[in-house]
Amino acid sequence: MAQRIVAVTGNEAVAEALRQINPDVCAAYPITPQTDMMQRFATFANNGKVKTEMILVESEHSAMSACVGASAAGGRVITATSSQGLALMWEILFIASGSRLPIVMPVVNRALSAPLNIHGDHSDAMGARDCGWIQLWSENAQEAYDNAIQSFRIAEHMDIRLPVMVCLDGFIISHSIERIEYLDDDAVKNFVGEYKQLNPLLDIEHPVSYGPLILPDYYMEFRRAQAEVMTKVSNVILNVAKDFEKISGRKYGLFETYRLDDAEVGLVILNSAAGTSKDVIDEFRNKGIKAGLLKPRLYRPFPYEEVGEALKHLKAVCVLDRADAFGASYGPLFMDIASSIYPYKDRPILINKIYGLGGRDYLPEHAELVLNELAEIAKTGKVKTFKEYIGVRE
Amino acid sequence: MKLKGWKEVTPGAVVTEAGSALKFKTGSWRAFRPKWIEENCIQCMFCWIYCPDMAIKVKDGKRAEFDYDYCKGCGICALECPGKKGNKAIVMEEEGK
């Protein structure tokens, strides 16, 4: 289990994972804050560190289209994007998942325009949450590196064959230097293994067609089959995580719980803000308040049953969303958590806070504010506001 | 033909049978039908070249009848047909008349 300890940014760590995997094709277009990741990867390609064919395209729509073509042809394919880039890919995201092409794409989360903003929030990936891709979310650079490596095994698993997004927070993680443990090149190579396409277009002995017109007599059967594949993802992710633990010593599940088992109040929060929240939870525990946290890792397909089981015993829970869902009553993560606990007769009171939009800092004070409110709700059973924005000026 | 259930369809709607488009007759939505008038045909084969599908049959190197299973009635063949002495060898007629 030899590992190299380095000080690198999130983008650098993911680019290193991609170098170690050495995919066949990469089609990418620069967009802040992802640019630096693909720039590093392109440098590896130019210096002969990987054998990847780099396709430099004129837009993200073309990047994802080239990925679809290369993946259907039979290659192991990657790209990466952020924000507007992901939005521009939207049409082709569905073609990648509907055609069951195991493309891997790090998404460096950034706010959406307008107004124009380059900083981190989750609006981009949340907008693409139901496009049939698997979404893994990462708290820090280590998790982004580890998720990137595992995502190839997950995407390419013969039970699944679906594309995967690996989400990490723009700038907060992508551009901050952290201590990371890198695995050996050989360990990564052996872990991901050889790639075998299911129906490669370039296999001229077995000619196939991708993208046929499927009319009302068959469309629903294909969509039903697609939904069935989603039910197999959790199991594959847990098995891949078990194998990954053997080479890394690091444990992964469908989500992470922090001091949650005996908690009375809890936070549900994605990505980097979970780290800040854990520190504040420790402070509240020291004060005698039983606080805990749940941080989803697998966000799509969402593990409703497992999350519901993990949260059902709490008295009050706040779901913190770093994205708004305009016109919906609550943030996207809140709606999934609400669905998870809905089947239970005795369930926690849920509140929703929208925080950190456009890179607005999430501070320990914010977590304190929320945990104090939850403690009050747990005591009285009364809720003042179900959905509120925190860290915003009146 | 019995339609397949969702457990039987191929992953990603990939078609694994070569040349299966032959089984899918696409001529049914034709609104205008080309008619071949053999006595005006000079065998220039323009219709065969210009047809965007493969709806002009060829037999022994010569132009034969239309393949109405696939002809969508676009009329390109009728437009391109030079005919003989000003008389077209292909004319379009309304379907169902």
Image (tube, helix red, strand yellow):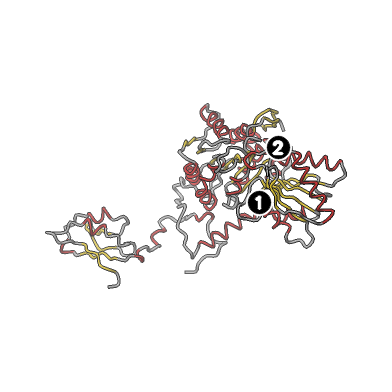
Residue A59 lies left or right of residue A334; in this view the side is: left
Residue A388 lies left or right of residue A284; in this view the side is: left
Counting from the top left corner in percent of width and height, residue A135 is at 62, 47
Q: Nearer the viewer, residue A303 or A208?
A: A303
Question: For residue A331, which numbered disc appears in the image?
Answer: 1
Q: Residue furthest right?
A: A288
User: Residue at 60% of width from left, 39% of height from top?
Assistant: A108
Count of labels shown? 2
Mark 2 closeness class: few <14, some 14–19, many ≥20 residues within 10 Å: some
Q: Nearer the viewer, residue A40 or A231?
A: A40
Counting from the top left corner in percent of width and height, residue A187 is at 66, 35
Q: Nearer the viewer, residue A135 or A153?
A: A135
Chain letter, disc 2 residue: A
Question: Eyeballing the image, is A146 above or below A217?
Answer: above
Mark 1 closeness class: few <14, some 14–19, many ≥20 residues within 10 Å: many
Callout 2 amino acid = Ile
Q: Nearer the viewer, residue A119 or A20?
A: A119
Counting from the top left corner in percent of width and height, residue B20 is at 42, 58
Question: For residue A247, which numbered disc appears in the image?
Answer: 2
Chain letter, disc 1 residue: A
**CA–CA distance between discs 2 and 1?**
37 Å
Element class at badge 1 = loop
